[in-house]
Image: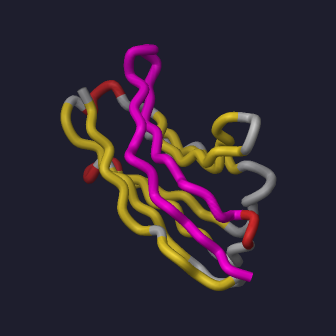
Amino acid sequence: QVQLVESGGGLVQAGGSLELSCTASGDTSCISTMGWYRPVPGKGRELVATITSGGSIFFADSVRGRFTISRDNAKNTVYLQMNSLKPEDTAVYYCNADGPDSACDYWGQGSQVTVSS
């Protein structure tokens, strides 16, 4: 079992910045990819950004150029630096960790990000 604990988030004005972090604990040996998702009404969760243990990164078009993702493999921690935030970025952001084994798929508790206009 893997536990994911998120921190960060909060309230910021449009154009501001926030950072989220997510630390995995427990049996983390199965994890290869860590990332962040946020819900989209009527569409489930949208992938925001992911990073593999080897450093391969993917961003959603909506955040590319504004958000950065990084990872400290030694600390089993992933970070999401969110810059130039927009009101439409307002959401609960969920950390995810998964691996090649389908049983290795874990979610954090969610972090509220609110961007005021």
Rendered image coloring scheme: secondary structure
Tell me where residue 102 sits by quadrant: top left
Residues in magenta, as a range = 89-117
Tell me where residue 97 sits by quadrant: top left
| Residue at 58%, 79% in the rendered image | 17
Q: How many marks?
A: 0
As drawn, which residue projects farthest toward the right?
A: 61
- Residue 25 magenta-highlighted: no
- Residue 95 magenta-highlighted: yes
The quadrant of the image that shows the N terminus is top left
Left or right of 85, for residue 92: left
- Residue 42: image x %, image y %? 76, 36
Left or right of 6, for residue 33: right
- Residue 43: image x %, image y %? 74, 35
| Residue at 33%, 25% in the rendered image | 30
The quadrant of the image that shows the C terminus is bottom right
- Residue 110: image x %, image y %? 45, 51
As drawn, which residue projects farthest toward the left?
A: 26
- 96 shown above or below 104: below
- 78 shown above or below 25: below
| Residue at 44%, 29% in the rendered image | 98
Q: Nearer the viewer, residue 23 or 8?
A: 8
| Residue at 22%, 41% in the rendered image | 25
- Residue 82: image x %, image y %? 60, 69
As drawn, which residue projects farthest toward the top?
A: 102
Tell me where residue 107 sits by quadrant: top left
